[in-house]
């Protein structure tokens, strides 16, 4: 895994997008997280459905615990510790030349911090955006991205990056 503080270099025509914030709840009582389900175009939804079939039963040692409402566009592990949403809109932050990113097993992710400081990652250079929100336990742990890299690579094709795998 490598990290980068370089801008993503996306073309200006690709800067349109609306940030859809996830409302992620976490509870120690074992209650599942609650999220906003994305509504991507049909072609992107098909990539997300393929991703749903590839997702592992455990991520970073956390068992599968999908958020509510149930959808092929969302998945979770550890009762809200790790929440994935597929087909999210392009985050505005991707237009920021100072945006930070990381690479985990060939998948590039843009890093954002939520208002509470927890990390949220969104894939870049893919045909649809996949967002992974982590709770405070993973503030400095990229293990979940490593576990999700193979499913993302298998199901969501590369877009704009010639080095994308």
Image (cartoon, rainbow, N blue to C red):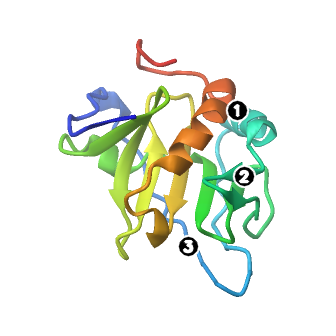
Task: Indicate the quadrant containing the N terminus: top left, top right, bottom left or bottom right.
Answer: top left
Front-most of residues 125 and 137: 137
Q: Earlier in the sequence, mark 1 or mark 3?
A: 3
Percent position of residue 33, x then y: 67, 73
Helix, strand or loop at mark 2 = strand
Residue under the point 81% across and 63% down: 70
Above or below: residue 10 compared with residue 51: above
* Mark 1 residue crowding within 10 angstroms, few (<14) / some (14–19) / many (20+): many
- Mark 2 and mark 3: span between their CA atoms? 22 Å
Residue under the point 72% across and 67% down: 67
Reading the image, the residue beneath label 2 is: 58
Disc nearest the viewer among 2 and 1: 2
Seen in the image, is 73 located left or right of residue 147? right
Reading the image, the residue beneath label 3 is: 23
- Tell me the tag on residue 47: 1
Above or below: residue 64 compared with residue 16: below
- Tell me the tag on residue 24: none
Percent position of residue 120, x then y: 44, 57
Front-most of residues 82 and 128: 82
Q: Earlier in the sequence, mark 2 or mark 1?
A: 1
Seen in the image, is 122 located left or right of residue 56? left
Among the 4 quarters of the image, the one containing residue 8: top left
Specify the farthest residue to the top.
Answer: 162
């Amino acid at each position: 895994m490598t990290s980068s503080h370089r801008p993503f270099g996306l073309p200006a025509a690709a800067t349109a997008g609306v940030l859809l914030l996830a409302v992620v709840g976490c509870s120690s009582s074992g209650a599942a997280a609650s999220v906003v389900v994305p509504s991507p175009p049909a072609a992107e939804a098909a990539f997300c459905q393929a991703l749903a079939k590839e997702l592992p039963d455990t991520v970073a040692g956390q068992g599968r615990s999908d958020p509510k409402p149930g959808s092929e566009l969302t998945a979770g592990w550890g009762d809200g510790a790790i929440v994935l949403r597929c087909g999210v809109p392009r985050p505005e932050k991707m237009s920021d030349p100072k945006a930070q990113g990381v690479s985990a097993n060939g998948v590039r992710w843009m890093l954002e911090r939520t208002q509470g400081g927890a990390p949220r990652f969104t894939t870049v250079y893919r045909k649809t955006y996949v967002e992974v929100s982590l709770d405070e336990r993973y503030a400095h742990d990229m293990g979940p991205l490593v576990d999700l890299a193979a499913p993302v690579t298998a199901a969501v094709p590369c877009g704009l990056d010639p080095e994308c795998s």
